[in-house]
Image: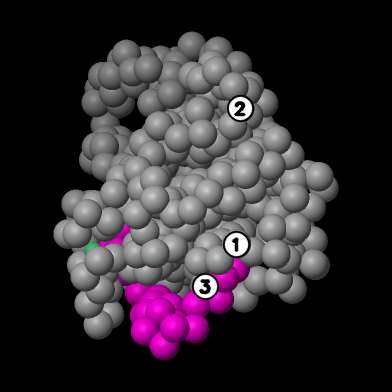
Amino acid sequence: MVFKDIIGHQDTKNALVRSVQNNHVAHAQLFDGAPGGANYALAWAFATYLNCENRQADDACGQCASCTKMAKLVHPDVYHVFPTAISPKVKGNSSEVFMPLWRAFVGVSPYRTLSDWLVFIDADNKQGNISAEEARSVVKRLSLKAFEAEYKVMFVWLPELMNVTSANALLKILEEPPAKTLFLLVTNQSDKLLTTIISRTQRVAVRAFEDDEVAQYLQQKNVEEKLARQTAYLADGNLSAAYLTATEATDDRHEWFTGWMRDCYKPALPELVKRADGFDAQPKERQKAILDYTTRLFREVFLWQQDVRALVRLQDDQLKFVQNFAGAIKPSSVEGIVNEISQAHYHLERNARAKILFLDLSLTLARLMRS
Ligand SMILES: [Zn+2]
């Protein structure tokens, strides 16, 4: 990870680069920002820059031995501490035994969240924490001299998940830091940290991503721009969520949906019967996804009709649908349609026969569209 891999945040990058160039690197820094933001990525790029053997004016070279090791998170002078939980994938619960999983996890994206991580490791429950034993072992390792780098670096991802004992072990070492050792704490909830830890660190405030940046990121991930725009609306500055939503949405749901709505609007009964068979043949998750999608688009129709157009941010073909239907159907009917779909969803979850349910729903929608 180098700075140029991270979209936006130019002011933060500049400040970090300047601190290295001016020899003013604070020994403990707290990258503070919301889940799904750039705080871990920035800390990672900063450590890469600091230990780069061929530093450029504004970024690490990305080529030298140190940069190569930093990119793979295999640098011997860099330690990683993060919350773990009991997992069927590894024996033990130290960050060290989880390290191969951690590399794979952040290798996909450095913007992933705690819940992404717990799912990734198949944690047996929804908690994760940093144990006292972990904190102690790191303190011991930090007392060793650096192997090859100028600085030893210790990353602590989500220090708010330390219990009191481990937090105190960390505090102790922050109070008496070994020379040329850098602590990079990456937090999502700085209000849960001991104030004594906060006062020992220099805070690097990391804002959430803006819509444009999320869209740009998705484009880089080869997701179409129009889809990216739609998804940015859902993402709320969280690239991890944005990416997941975008990949889920790349199926042909919209096409299926518009065909169905056309048949309801006409109404074309033989087509709807055929469609009910097609619906019945799909896996249940997909059936539910189609209904969710339908609800969502009709909500957008409703917003459009209420002149809350600023909130309607859809890709082009979705927008076309919303505009057409907003003009063709009465607002009271749109509300009825949303209710009917939500009821159908409810019954589908309770194992109603999909074919009958779908045909019934289609006929009700056809009636509401005409009323
Ligand atoms: Zn380098």
Identified at 61% across, 27% down, the residue is: 93
Quadrant field for ligand 1: bottom left
Q: Position of residue 176 (x, y in %)?
A: 70, 64
- Would you call the spot at circle 3 few (<14 residues within 10 Å), some (14-19), or many (20 or more)? some
Q: Amino acid at mark 3?
A: Arg
Q: Residues within 10 Å of mark 2 (few under 14, many from 20)?
A: some
Instruction: Residue at 39%, 50% (x, y): give it.
Output: 147
SS under mark 2? loop
Among numbered discs 3 and 2, the one appearing first in the sequence:
2
Relative to residue 131, is residue 102 drawn left or right? left
Residues at discs 3 and 1 in contact (Cβ within 8 Å): no
Q: Are marks 3 and 2 in contact (CB under 8 Å)?
A: no
Q: Amino acid at mark 1?
A: Pro
Give the CA separation, mark 3 to mark 2.
Answer: 32 Å
Taking depth in this image into account, of 362 and 24 the one nearest to the observer is 24
Q: Which residues are magenta?
A: 1-28
Location of residue 323 by image quarter: bottom left
Q: Between marks 3 and 1, how big is the CA–CA gap? A: 31 Å
Q: Which mark is residue 178?
A: 1
**Cβ atoms at labels 2 and 1 below 8 Å apart:** no
Residue 129 shows in this picture: no
Q: Which mark is residue 93?
A: 2
Residue 73, horizontal then vertical, whole percent: 36, 46
Per the image, label 1 sits on a secondary structure element best described as loop
User: Quadrant of the image for the N terminus?
Assistant: bottom left
Q: Earlier in the sequence, mark 2 or mark 1?
A: 2
Instruction: Tell me the residue that label 3 is attached to.
Output: 207
| CA neighbours of label 1 inside 10 A, class few (<14), some (14 to 19), many (20+) | some
Of labels 2 and 1, the one closer to you: 1
Q: Secondary structure at mark 3?
A: loop
Whole-number angstrom distance, CA of label 2 to CA of label 1: 26 Å
